[in-house]
Image (tube, coloured by chain):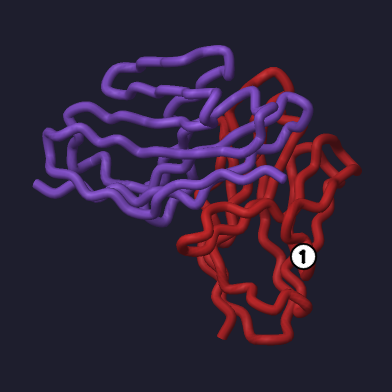
Chain colours: A purple, B red
């Protein structure tokens, strides 16, 4: 079945780059997503990548996809304290209109 | 403004009671979803509905029930059969031509 895995915690200093990693098992995944969750709130879409792409950049965010290894990463450049949140990786197969989420990575940015 | 509204935001329940969580969207989305969030376990799918009057079980449907009588509404009932109902519940919706899953702000249920 589908499975998405992430490490649970990441701690960085303000101004450093953060890299959050994700692995998935479904080789037929078509879209891969990164969502952000602030404390006590819902999730907001940060970015997504289509499976035929290797990289996508959007301002401070860079997504890298290694389809062979089923590995997805999110790099946040110049990390700020406001980036502290939980980051979820998710995958979707075009045949199904549901997303499978990872466990989430809690990013803590210290001044 | 368009979006998803969940209510109540906080809910306390005694053991043995059923409780219904409300989810309303004005985004004209066909598909709606209920997820449960527990610390360290991420989001797990409870039920989803791709069209009015139809819904499917997700990965952890036992002890839950839903209805989809209107496009805008997808209420979730947590029944007394759910053995560990204390959690954060998230409702979401998606349009048929979109790739983004829109989330509500969540409802936190605590069983006393």
Q: Is residue B76 left or right of residue A101?
A: right
Q: Is residue A92 left or right of residue A71?
A: right
Above/below status of B98 relative to A25: above
Q: What percent of the width, then of the height, locates residue A21?
A: 40, 38
Q: Identify the chain of the residue marked 1, using the numbered disc in the image.
A: B
**Which one is nearer the viewer's eye here, A46 or A29?**
A29
Q: Is residue B16 left or right of residue B51?
A: left
Q: What percent of the width, then of the height, locates residue A26?
A: 66, 35
**Which one is nearer the viewer's eye here, A59 or A20?**
A20
Q: Is residue A78 visible?
A: yes
Above/below status of A30 relative to B18: above
Above/below status of A19 relative to A65: below
Above/below status of A31 relative to B10: above
Q: Residue at x 62, y 45 (%)?
A: A3
Q: Residue at x 12, y 34 (%)?
A: A15
Q: Which residue is mark 1?
A: B64
Q: Residue at x 70, y 37 (%)?
A: A98
Q: What percent of the width, then of the height, locates residue B11?
A: 56, 71
**Which one is nearer the viewer's eye here, B74 or A53?**
A53
> Which quadrant of the rendered structure holds the N terminus of chain A?
top right
Q: Residue at the far right: name it.
A: B53
């Amino acid at each position: 079945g589908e499975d998405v895995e992430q490490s649970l915690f990441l701690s960085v200093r303000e101004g450093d780059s953060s890299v959050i990693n994700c692995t998935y098992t479904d080789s037929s995944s078509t879209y891969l997503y990164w969502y952000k969750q602030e404390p006590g709130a819902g999730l907001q879409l940060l970015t997504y990548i289509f499976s035929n792409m290797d990289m996508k950049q959007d301002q401070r965010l860079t997504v890298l996809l290694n389809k062979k290894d089923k590995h997805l990463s999110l790099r946040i450049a110049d990390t700020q304290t406001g980036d502290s949140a939980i980051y979820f990786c998710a995958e979707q197969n075009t045949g199904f209109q549901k997303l499978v989420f990872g466990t989430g990575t809690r990013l803590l940015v210290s001044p | 403004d368009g979006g998803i509204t969940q209510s109540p935001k906080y809910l306390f329940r005694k053991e043995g009671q059923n409780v219904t969580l409300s989810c309303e969207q004005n985004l004209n989305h066909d598909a709606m979803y209920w997820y449960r969030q527990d610390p360290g376990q991420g989001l797990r799918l409870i039920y989803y509905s791709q069209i009015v009057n139809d819904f499917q079980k997700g990965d952890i449907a036992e002890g839950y029930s839903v209805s989809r009588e209107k496009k805008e509404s997808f209420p979730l009932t947590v029944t007394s059969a759910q053995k560990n109902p204390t959690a954060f519940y998230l409702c979401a919706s998606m349009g048929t031509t979109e790739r983004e899953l829109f989330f509500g702000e969540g409802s936190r249920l605590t069983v006393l």
